[in-house]
Image: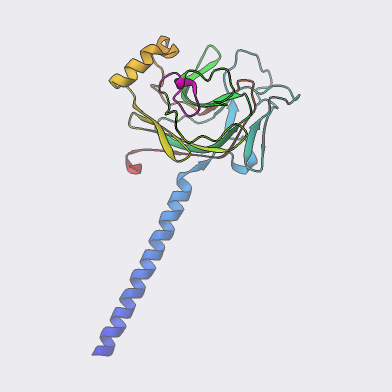
Amino acid sequence: MIQSIDRFLTVLVLSLLGTAFLFSHHARGDEDKEWTNLLQGDSLELWEPGPSKAKNPSGEIGDRWSVKNGVVHLDRDSEDGRGGQIWTKRNYYDFELKFEFKIAHDSNSGIKYRAIDIDGRAIGCEYQIIDDDNYRDNKNPTHRTACLYELVAVPADRKLNPAGEWNTGRIRVSKNQFEHWLNGEKVVSIEFGSDDWKECFAKSKYKVHPNFAKAAGPIVLTDHGDTVSYRNLYIRELGDESE
């Protein structure tokens, strides 16, 4: 009788362990599939040229953009043609984007989202990326690295590595809550359409665009004529099941 119970308990434990293994393996697989590598295959195949006032007959991404060893790089000093902003072929509304970035000395760039084409310009929310110490546009707290450009400032004491070094960033937009993260810390949080949002929006240059950030749009890597690099650029769409 005791031996029968022991055998039963052994089988039960092994069964539970096997189920746990299969579940955890499946969960890891789902998690892996959740994220999309926007630089997959060391290429820009998920991207296309963004809007531009300059004519680009080829319809191709400018030669100043390159991808190598998982790093997408825009080279200000390159003599190879043009750069131009680029944006994803797919639009996103609620999403999470994680990335690493490195800005050059005295340079300015950024990542836009929920963007639309207005007269050859990508107009949308922007995770600002600049050389805070040296770039001329460093006095306005809503123009500093990781801010929601023109709308929400960042804390002066946030953790920021200087130009020429890598930083980690994250943008999360879910259920009208907009968040910017820098080096593991949340530095921006605002609810779209809230009183705070309306006040910030009314003071910004975007107030002339009534549909600003209201619809799904592409992720944009801007070109302000300066050198910038990105790596580990991953995105996932968010919904009720992600909360």
Q: Quadrant of the N terminus?
A: bottom left
Looking at the rendering, which quadrant does residue 108 occupy? Answer: top right
- Res 117 seen here: yes
| Residue 91 placement (x, y as % from top left) | 47, 29
**Residue in front for this viewpoint, 209 or 215:** 209
Going 39% across and 16% down the picture, which residue do you hit?
211
Going 33% across and 69% down the picture, which residue do you hit?
16
Magenta stretch, overall SS: loop
Q: Is residue 48 left or right of residue 95?
A: right
| Residue 187 placement (x, y as % from top left) | 41, 32
Looking at the rendering, which quadrant does residue 50 occupy? Answer: top right
Number of residue marks = 0
Residue 95, magenta (yes or no): no
Q: Is residue 97 left or right of residue 44?
A: left
Highlighted range, magenta: 141-152
Q: Is residue 135 left or right of residue 29?
A: right
**Residue in front for this viewpoint, 107 or 241:** 107
